[in-house]
Every structure is written in structure tokens, then in C-alpha cells.
Image: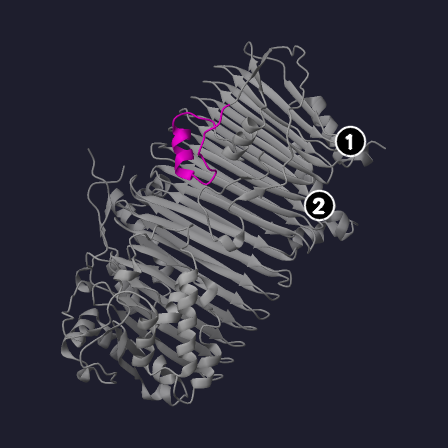
Amino acid sequence: MIVKIEGNHLPKETWNKLDVNIAGIDSLPTFSCRDIDMLEVDGWKQSRFTPKYHKDLSPRDTEKIRALSKKGEIISGVGPDLDRLIVASKIDAYRFEAKGKNPKPLILNFDFLSGAADLTPIEIVVGDGVEAVVVEQLTAKKVVHGVAGAQIKFKIGKNAKVTFVQVQDILSNMTFINDVGAIQKDDSEFNVITSIISGGTTYYGCQTNLYGKRAKYNHDIGYMVKGNEKLDMNFVAEHIAKKTEASIHAEGVLRGNAYKIFRSTVDFNVGCTASSGEERENVLLMDDTVINKTVPLILCDEEDVEGAHGGTIGRLDDETLFYMMSRGMTKEEVYQKVANARLDAVINKIPVPEIRDRWIKRLHPEEEE
Amino acid sequence: MKEKTRVEDVDRSIYDIKNKDADAYKFQSGLDQDVVLQLSYEKNDPKWMRAFRLKCLEMFNEMNMPQWGPAIDGLDMDNIVTYVRPKDNKMVADWDEVPSEIKNTFERLGIPQAEREALAGVGAQYDSELVYHNLKEEVKQQGVIYSDLESALHGEYAEMIREHFMKLVPPNDHKFAALHGAVWSGGSFVYVPPGVKVEIPLQSYFRLNAPGAGQFEHTLIIVDEGADLHFIEGCSAPKYNIANLHAGCVELFVGKNAKMRYSTIENWSKNMYNLNTKKARVEEGGSVEWISGSFGSHVSYLYPTSVLAGRGASSEFTGVTFSGGGQDLDTGCKAIHLAPDTTSFVNTRSISKDGGKNTFRSSIVVMPQAKNAKAAVSCESLMLDSISRSDTIPAMDIRTKDADIGHEAKIGKISDDAVFYLMSRGLSEEEAKALIVSGFADNVSKELPLEYAVEMNNLIRLEMIGSIG
């Protein structure tokens, strides 16, 4: 039985004292797979299969992982240890394959109960020229305990366009592994909108292989970490083919005793000429008891590329604060408004109206009254 | 097919002077307790220093090699000679008294000339020993102390040195700090009294001549309250086919409202493992500026660190790193904010070509008590071909809400838009690209005294043939 895995590995490590190179996820239970209702979903063919993993592949084997990416393998953000755990737990994965060019949105709802110990691997196949929306909502109706995880791997065909919406609202005391991986063929687009509203201790990872020419990956992340919550993130854009584009943009707020690590890597491999990658994070810190760690990497093996990162960490600028307080708000109200605005900006990008409205109401219950 | 614009490799011919070391005295290669005791005996160490060296050796043997940086498999301590003394070694204050072969080396490197024209004092180290040390009279009269560290261990500043030596860089910091503590030799001690401004810079120059040798000099500088000092460090070595090692240490204590500028032009040869440690502690209102040009070494681990311990303390790091074929240079800086109103700024550039590997690595840590801390990190990297590599790994650990932290980085080739803009102003494509590349390293050269800026620019010569693309 596996009781500990490592994940969210920084592709090029830094000083050990900073404690950002990798996450150790321990005290793992015996997992089972959640039942997903296999009722027919318009436009999606469903099946089950037994997943595989790479023996002897450690999450720290950056060169081996890169080599596998170049061969067209999907490596997820949390990393190969999670694959090993899934196989060891004898869990069969779900596969959803898009039928037709414009299937209805695939909505995956995970509602966690106390004592959860489930791990659900899913593969989503979107063929050539297909446009699809996939929504993953991870919720708990009250404070729950337990350890759970969901892994979604995407295979995105030529000229396909996938919009993947993730909303996580799991109340505290749960440990949750939220893992995403994708491989993109020529001219494909993978647009990810991730909102983390609440969630105990969350390990979030997303890695995309820009395997096909002119593939594009865009990831908007909004997060709020508060109380004693911990959010450990890892984003990797692996540029393999020519003219690929990646953009990772995170807006976040930390309150209380929140602990957050944001790792983001744009990795330009030899041959990805004329590619561009950028990463940006803006974090608002609202209390002195928070811990914020940010590690944005650019790794470059190719001359003809453009890589950039930037970001800000800290408080509101004095001008904005002054302006808003002069309109009658207290300092606390100003900070709360700005904090909500950061998540709103991401939620408002959700292309499914009923899903978007649901989460706007969640963030602004006062507007219901 | 158009030829690519070339940035000519760093010209090392003037640095590649090899003097026979047949007459020099040197230890057997390797490192054990006997070597450390023998070194301590040669140095006439006080008892505490002997015990300290032995303790450091223990730590070195127990600690692991770093796994996160460039490979240093080619460094075998069993093959490194930790102590080499030139024949007829004695430290003098007159260049005419320096043994001719050694003097000629420093003449060709321009050190005596620089001293005459632009410096307040010079310390010149050859292999493991200082061969020359001098301080201009007018600076002495200000009360400034500039001495070799070893004799200062026995003089009126002995207690001051004992209080400060390897307190900022403790031997348990990392494996090569422990090594340094065990086998350090040579280096300088500088003390600037309160309120004294040293108008022109002091310099130390380190020359490693013996093949397979290590240089482990220790520089300890104390700038007292309200004082002001600019210290320049230069280094070079001829190239051999076997590894040389540099594991020096620099400790800077910057007092209340004092200023310290520490400039380095590093041009070790391409067989050198440069595992150097530099750290400054800055008290209230004080400031430290690091100016760093890294052009040499086979492998470099170099991260000047500023501990901002007092209210309003500040640090600024300006650096350029040039990695050519056969080089894996891992450089950067750290700033640790421990007090309110502290500021740190980082501005670095790097150029990679001909298969060179370059890593910029930084760490900004802001602790909860560092209210109103500000930090900004900017890193730009220029890749000149697809066989080279350039990585940036900035890390930030922020633990207070009352901080303003910004960071940015860019990596890529020469901008087509910038070339177009300059061409629209009348420059040829070649002239435009030459201007852009030469200006890229300006962040460092403009901070140096003119003579050193010229030397630095001589290290990067541009050759424009055809056009890039």
C-alpha cells in the first residue's frame, strides 16, 4: 500500500532551504474510485479502461519526463507518482470521447462527503476539429474530512478547441489532489479556467504538452486561500513544436494563516522555434500571518522564442486604497471588494451561463437578498 | 545563407599566462586532518582558528554535495592542492620587491597601473598567499585599515576579527563554506572607521597560477557607522586541462547609515570550479551595492546575499553573466528582509552562446517583521544560438501583508522591433544589432569606474558579419 507520494515537482530545482522543490503528500488511505453516473451524455461516448504508469519514473526525473513529453506522452501536473498510486490502487479510469463536432458541455460534478477516500482518473478525448466544453465542479456541502483526488488527462486533436472549467469549493479539513494533464496536436487550443474558492489542503497541478505546431494553451486561475488552508500549485507548459503559445495567468488572495506555493514553468525545448510563453501572478496578501511562495521559471533551450514572466505580491497600492476609502468604504471593505474582484474576473470567463451564475451567487450571496 | 551576427568569445589571451611553479612550495593534493593541521602550522594560527579549521573539516566530510545546481562531478578533492606558496614568498608594499615573474604577471593584468591611476590600495594574491599589499598614505591617515587577514589575526584587530570571522557565512551554510573554513588562506581585512568616506576604491586581485590548485581567500570588511567604501575584486587564472577550484568567502558588515559597494570582475579560466560565497549584513539605514560581472569559470555557483537587518537597510544587485562554450554558470543573488522599510533591487542580464549554459537563480525572503519592505527583481536573458541554454529561477517567500514585491523576466533573441526602430533612425542592420548587444551589458559597465568598465567591455567584443537571422 502506498502511503506517501511526491508531486508538483519544480522541473529545475532551487535551494532546498526554500522548501519549494517538491510536495510530499502523505497519510494516504486506501483509495477506491468514485462512481460517475454513466448515463448517456449528449455527444460523449463513455467507457472504462485500466490505466498504465511508467515504472521507475520518479517525479524528480526531469530529463526522462521531458523525453516522454517529446514522444507524445501525457505527463500531468502533479506528476508520475500519482499515476503509480492510481495503478497500485487498482482503479479503472473513465474515458469520455467527444462525438460530433460540437457536443454538449460535459459536466462532471464531484460532491465529497466526510471520510472520503476516493481517487478518480478520467481521460477526455477530443478529436480533430471538435469544439468542446468540459466542466469539473468539486464541492462539499459542509466541512468534510478525508483524502480525495481527481485526475483529468486530455487528448486534444488537430484544430480542436477545448475549454475546461474547474471550480473547487471544498470546505476545510480535506486533503485534495486536483491534477490535470494534456497533449495538444497541431493548431489546437486548450483554454483552462480554474477557480479555487476553498479547500483544506489542495495539491493542484496542470501540465500541457504543446506537441503540435501552433498549439495554444491559456490558463486563467483565480484562488482564495484563507483560514488554515494550504494551496500547493504547479503549472508547466512544455513547448515542443514550433509556433506554440502559452499563457498562465493567476490572480489570488491570501488571508488568515493561508499557505500558498505557486510554481509555474515555461519550458522551451529545442525545436520549438517562434514559440512564446508567459506567466503572470498577482497576489493580494491580506494578513500578516500568511505565507506566500512564488517560483516562476523560464527554461530555454531554443534561441528563437519569447519568454516572459512578471508579477506582484503584496498589498493594494496607496492610490487605489485612498480612492476607494474616499468613497466611504472601510479599509477592510476595500480589501474584500478587491479580493472578490480577482475571483470574479476568472468566474466571469466561464462560458456556460448556468455554471457561471451559480458561482457568482456563491461569491456574492448578498446580491441575492 | 546569411551569416549570423557573432558576439566574439571573451578574449582570454592576456589572462593565460602560466608561470612555472616548479620552485613553489605546495602540499600534496587531497584533504584530510593532516593537511589542515599542516596548513594551520604554516599560518601560525591562534588556537581558536586551528580548532575552527578542524571542526569545519568534520562538517565538510559530513555534508552532501548540492543536487540542485550544475554538475560538479569533475571536481575531485583528492586531486586538488589546497596550498601553494610562491618561491621567496613574502608580502611587500613595493612592486619592485615582488619576484619578477609574479610581478610581470600582474603588470600584464594592469594591476600596478590601476593602483597608480585609480586606487587607494591594492592587495594582490598569487595562489595561496598575498604577495603585495599597500594602502595610500592619505587613506591610512583617515584611520582606514587594509591589511592581509592572516597578520591581522595576531594584531590589534585580532579580537574584532574573531568576533566576525565566518559569523555571517557560518561553515554549516553549505559544504563549500565548510571547506573554506577548513583550508582558507590569504585574503584581506578592511576596517573603515565611523564617518570616514574612502573617496577612491580599494582593490584585491586574485591570481591562481598552479594547475590543480585551489584558492580559498577570505575577505572580511567592516564599514563602521556612517562610513563609505568601494571595494573592487578581480580574479583570473590560466587555463589547464585539470580542474582548479575557487572556494573563497566574502563577509561584509555594513554599519548604521554606512555604504558599501562591492564590485567584481570574475574571469577565471574555463577549467575553474568557482564555488564562491559572498554575504553582507546591513544595519539600520545602511546600504550595500553588488556589481558583478561573471565571464569565466567552467562551473560557477555564485549568489551574493544581503541580510537587511536594520530598519531602512537596502541592497542593490547589478549583474551580467556571459556563458560561452564549455561553461555552466549558475549565478544570481539573495535578499533577506528582516526589518521594516528595507528595500532590495535586482537587475541582471545574461548572454549565452556557443553551447554555454546560464542559470539565473534568486531568492527574496521577507519575514513578518519586515513591514513596508519593497523588492523588485528584473532579469533579462539573451540567447544567441540554439545550442545554448538559459534558465531563470526566481523565488519569493513573503510573510507579511505590508510588502510590495515585483518581479519580471524576459528571455529571447535580439528583438526585431528594436532593430527595425534603430534602422529607421539611419543605422545599418549590423550597426543596430551591435548597439543592442553592447548596450545589453551596460547595466554593469556603467556602475564601474571607467578603467574597469573599459576592461569589461574589452572582454566582450562584437564582431558583426552579415546579419542575424
Q: Would you say B205 lies left or right of A62 here? A: left
Q: Would you say A132 lies left or right of B159 here? A: right
Which callout, 2 or 1, points to the residue nearer the camera?
1
Kind of element beneath mark 1: loop
Q: Would you say B345 lies left or right of A140 here? A: left
Q: Which quadrant of the structure image shows residue A92?
A: top right
| Magenta residues (range) | A52-74
Q: Residue A270: x percent and y percent?
A: 34, 35
Residue A157 sits above or below residue B94 on the image: above
Q: Earlier in the sequence, mark 2 or mark 1?
A: 1
Question: Within 10 Å of the Cα at label 2, are there few (<14), some (14-19), or many (20+) other Cα atoms?
Answer: many
Kind of residue at disc 1: Lys
Q: Chain of mark 2?
A: A
- Front in this rendered view, residue B377 or A299: A299
Q: Residue B206: x percent and y percent?
A: 28, 70
Q: Is residue A68 magenta?
A: yes
Quadrant where the C terminus of chain B lies? top left
Q: Which quadrant of the structure image shows residue B32?
A: bottom left
Dominant SS type (magenta): loop
**Is residue A255 visible in this depiction of the protein?**
yes
Mark 1 — residue? A141
Q: Is residue B216 magenta?
A: no
Question: Within 10 Å of the Cα at label 1, are there few (<14), some (14-19), or many (20+) other Cα atoms?
Answer: few
Quadrant where the N terminus of chain B lies? top left
Residue A109 sits above or below residue A221 on the image: above
Mark 2 — residue? A226
